[in-house]
Image (spheres, rainbow, N blue to C red):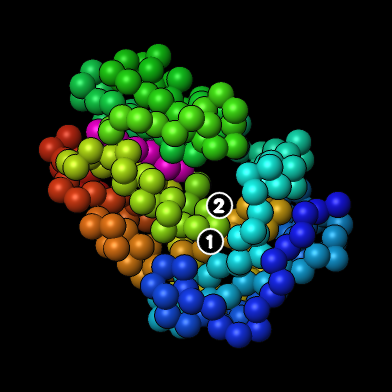
């Protein structure tokens, strides 16, 4: 039995990024997840999840889970069944992310302190520590061992496949920013809406309430969200991005690739 979802608002909601009007845009069953192409669909649960979309910045979001506690999320989304709908969570993603971070920053690893925000079981930061980064810590509110909010500020904050899980992405970005040094770098991934997004609507594969995808960025929304916190962004592709106030020297070589 899934916890109560917030009652749907038929009136436009303020966009969670830019506060402009976001009208109802589409509805999917709670069972819809991002791994349907590989694992197939789950049985429908009869629990509709409505998404709103901002007419100005294109941000797509649901407020259905906005009243949920962390305990609700743990019970109904980040539970034992989660690995079925996000099979790369435990190993494939952190392993690939570690390779990417080493590729980008390996030459300076002995002087860099890194935080992996939303880092799950901590495999990414453990891998980076083992290969010689000065420091690598994990924060993840849904993993007991790593749920203590970080106290320091870091040279690099990584945040892979996490922003789309945030019911309050502006608060999430503020938290990431507060853990980043003034001249630090945020390296993050979240897939932005494709140019033909309107053709797919909420049927787009990346919209998946069962695996917690509640905030789906357009490129404009991504830029605005970080700008609001004083950050510039640069994208390597539709999925991989970086954000910074002043581009740190150790990341200058990346601008050529972004
Ligand atoms: Zn907006």
Task: Name the secondary structure under disc 2.
Answer: helix
The answer to whether residue 76 is above or below residue 197 is: above
The question of residue 206 being in magenta is answered with no
Q: Which corner quadrant of the image does residue 116 belong to?
A: top left
Q: Report which residue position mark 2 lands on.
A: 165
Q: Report which residue position mark 1 lands on.
A: 215
Secondary structure mainly formed by the magenta segment: strand
Observer able to see residue 34: no
Q: In this view, which residue lies farthest toward the left?
A: 249
Q: Which residues are magenta?
A: 155-160
Q: Which mark is residue 48?
A: none
Observer able to see residue 75: yes
- Mark 1 crowdedness (10 Å alpha carbons): few <14, some 14-19, many ≥20: many
Q: Which corner quadrant of the image does residue 18 belong to?
A: bottom left
Residue drawn at x 41%, y 58% is 170
**Left or right of 25, for residue 110:** left
Task: Name the secondary structure under disc 1.
Answer: strand
**Left or right of 94, for residue 77:** right
Residue drawn at x 76%, y 36% is 80
Pointers 2 and 1 in contact (C-beta within 8 Å):
yes
Label count reads: 2
The question of residue 158 being in magenta is answered with yes
Residue drawn at x 47%, y 68% is 16
């Amino acid at each position: 039995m899934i916890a109560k979802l917030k009652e749907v608002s038929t009136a436009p909601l303020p966009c969670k990024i830019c506060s402009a009007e976001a009208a109802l845009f589409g509805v999917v069953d709670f069972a819809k997840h991002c791994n349907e192409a590989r694992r197939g669909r789950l049985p429908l649960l009869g629990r509709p999840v409505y998404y709103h979309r901002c007419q100005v910045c294109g941000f797509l979001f649901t407020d259905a889970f906005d009243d949920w506690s962390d305990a609700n999320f743990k019970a109904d989304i980040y539970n034992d069944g989660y690995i079925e709908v996000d099979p790369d969570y435990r190993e494939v993603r952190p392993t690939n992310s570690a390779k990417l971070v080493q590729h980008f920053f390996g030459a300076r690893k002995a002087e860099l302190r890194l935080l992996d925000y939303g880092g799950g079981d901590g495999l990414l930061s453990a891998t980076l520590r083992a290969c010689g980064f000065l420091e690598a810590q994990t924060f993840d509110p849904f993993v007991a061992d790593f749920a203590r909010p970080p106290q320091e500020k870091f040279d690099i904050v990584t945040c892979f496949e996490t922003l789309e899980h945030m019911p309050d992405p502006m608060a999430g970005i503020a938290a990431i920013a507060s853990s980043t040094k003034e001249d630090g770098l945020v390296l993050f991934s979240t897939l932005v809406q494709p140019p033909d997004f309107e053709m797919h609507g909420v049927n787009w594969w990346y919209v998946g309430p069962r695996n917690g995808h509640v905030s789906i960025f357009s490129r404009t929304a991504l830029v605005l969200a970080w700008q609001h916190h004083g950050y510039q962004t640069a994208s390597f592709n539709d999925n991989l991005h970086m954000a910074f106030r002043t581009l740190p020297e150790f990341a200058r070589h990346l601008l050529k690739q972004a």
